[in-house]
Each structure stands twice: as C-alpha cells, then as structure tokens.
Image: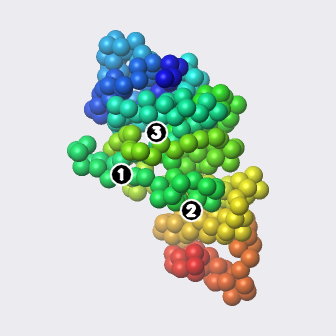
Amino acid sequence: MQTDLVSIIIPTYNRAKLLPETLDSILEQSYNNWECIIVDDRSTDKTKEVVNHYTKLDSRFLFYERPIERLNGANACRNYGFEKSNGQYINWFDSDDIMLPNFLKSKLEIFNNENSLEAVFAFGAYFDTSIYDIEVSKPDISYTDILDYVTNRFYLITHGPLWKKTFLKDKELYDEHRQKIQDTEFHFRMLIEGVKFKFYDASHLFLIRRGDDRISSRKSLTVSKLEDVLKYHYFTLISSKKAKSKQQQKYLEVTSRNILKSFYELVAYQDSLLLRYRLFKKHRKKIEEASSSLKDNFISSIKIKLGVIFTVIFKKGFSLLVK
C-alpha cells in the first residue's frame, strides 16, 4: 500500500458554516498520510477562526491566506496551495463538499498497482441538503479520445483527479485570469499533454453540494464569464493538432459548433444592441474560424451568417448557428 504524502488543497471564501463538514470528512479518511492546505481568499466571515480550530486540532491542517499581490479567486488559491505543498500526490478539493472515507485510499491503490500512472480520476455525486439523497454524476463512456471530452461524454470535476506531483510540476496550472469553466479548461490541457491515467469507476468517492450561492449559479454570469466559455471553446479548436483526435474532422465540427453556441449565449444574453455589436466585433475572428472549419456547403455557410446577424440584432438565431 502507498505510504506517500498526499497534499489536499482547498481554496475557500466565506465558507465558515460549511467548511467544518468538509474538514471533518478529511479527518475521517482511511488513508492517514495527508496534509490539507487551506488557502483563504481573504474571507470576511469567520472562516479564519474555523480553520484555526482545525490547525490546533490536527497539525496536518495548514492554513494560508492568498498573498495580497496575487489575483483574487479560487484559481490563484489553488495554484498558491500547490506552491506550498509537500506531497508526492496532489488532490484539489472545494470547501463546501465532502470526501467519502475511501476517497484517497481507493485512488492510491490504483497507483500502487500501476506506478507508471500520472493521475487517477474518480467521479462524485450531487446532493442538496441530505447526503443520503444523491444524484450520481458519472461519465457515460470511458475515455478513448479527446473528442469524448469536448462532446462532454467524458468529463472531470475538480475533486476527481489525484495527480502525481511530478507530472504537474512543469505545467501551467489553473488560469488565474479565468472566472468560468476553469476546471474544464485545465483538464483539457492536461489531457492533450498526454497524461497517463486510469478511472476509478467502482463507486462515487465524493459528494458535491448544490446550492443557490455556488459561484457557478446562472445569476452570477457576467460578460467576462460568458467570454471565458467562448475562449475555451476557441482554444479547443485551435489546439486540434496537439489534441490529435482520431476523428479529426468530427473534432473540428464539434469544437466549431461549440464556439457558435457559446457566441450565441454570450451575445443573446445582453440587452444592449450596442454591446452585442461590440462583442461581435471583438470575437469576429473566432466566428469566422469556426465557420471555415466546418467545411459545410454554401447553404450552411449562409445559415451561419444569418444566424450571427439575427443573434446580434434580434437575440435570435440559435438554430441557424448550431444545426
């Protein structure tokens, strides 16, 4: 059985009421050789007092505040926690979710059997108020190609991967400027880097709390967050050569349609015609590249152009862009 140190890295902000349940679940891990690095994004509630209680209770809990010169947000906290980590393995986690007792042990056992692996992935389950009323979130298929990821048939959640630190050490980690789908973008980059992994699929290993106050709430969407989604899909398109999909044309088609869909969601979400036009001008190159990558016939190209016009002027045209 592995005896290496695992670094659990948790960014937090104003989670004083929920954080104890998360930290208690770490204390209950069947694998004991861990450190838990909690990085506070300069909370205004009693988060610091809560964490201080746990650092006194168990020396494996380590507390840091995000340095003032670093950008605010969970991504900077995740990266800073990595810089402070001492473990041979890394597992990022969120401050309002729950590890099941074998969360670490189950993944480490796979590493123990195959030392050449660089990551072990796992899936979780969602809950609202009761941990006994859950909705399991498991990918529909096993990963065979990067196309599986960009079509969302295979997906990863921040908590799922246990990483070998040596694999991550020379990589760009979480994009600290990104506010939306940062985990999706990070995992895409790691997959096209060719990470060697296995998926633990026997059962879910963690619980994800649903709630109206989660950062991903629809109400919290801003132009910059919607732009992050568009930029991510554009990045998947221009990374097609590095991605090396076995179904290259299908990959180009999917990523291009994702760009058009996210453009619609960005622009149609805005009430101001002037802002919609400015967003079109700003992202016009992305739309043109997506359109040219589709290799559709003349009629399809006209439909896309009409879809863009209808989206900008009338906030309509979704079916013209994505079909």
Q: Hey, what amino acid is under mark 1?
A: Val
N-term mark: 3 or 2: 2
Residue 73 location (% of width, % of height): 50, 37
Give the structural element (helix, strand or loop) at label 2.
loop
The residue that appears at 45% across and 18% down in the rendered structure is 33
The mark total stands at: 3
The furthest residue to the right: 241
Q: Relative to 147, is 113 above or below? A: above
Which of 296 and 115 lies nearest the eye of the viewer?
115
Closest to the camera, between mark 1 and mark 3, is 1
Q: Circle 3 is placed at which residue position?
A: 159
N-term mark: 1 or 2: 1
Quarter the C terminus occupies: bottom right
Q: CA distance from mark 3 to mark 2?
A: 21 Å
On the picture, is 322 further left or further right than 293? left
Q: CA distance from mark 1 to mark 3?
A: 14 Å
Q: Circle 1 is placed at which residue position?
A: 136
On the picture, is 201 further left or further right than 76? left
Residue 153 location (% of width, % of height): 52, 60
The furthest residue to the front: 113
Closest to the camera, between mark 1 and mark 2, is 1
Q: Relative to 48, is 17 above or below? A: below
Residue 276 location (% of width, % of height): 57, 68
Q: Relative to 294, is 121 above or below? A: above
Q: CA distance from mark 1 to mark 2?
A: 19 Å
On the picture, is 202 further left or further right than 209? right
Give the structural element (helix, strand or loop) at label 1.
strand
Q: Relative to 167, is 323 above or below? A: below
Q: Which mark is residue 151?
A: 2
Q: Hey, what amino acid is under mark 3?
A: His
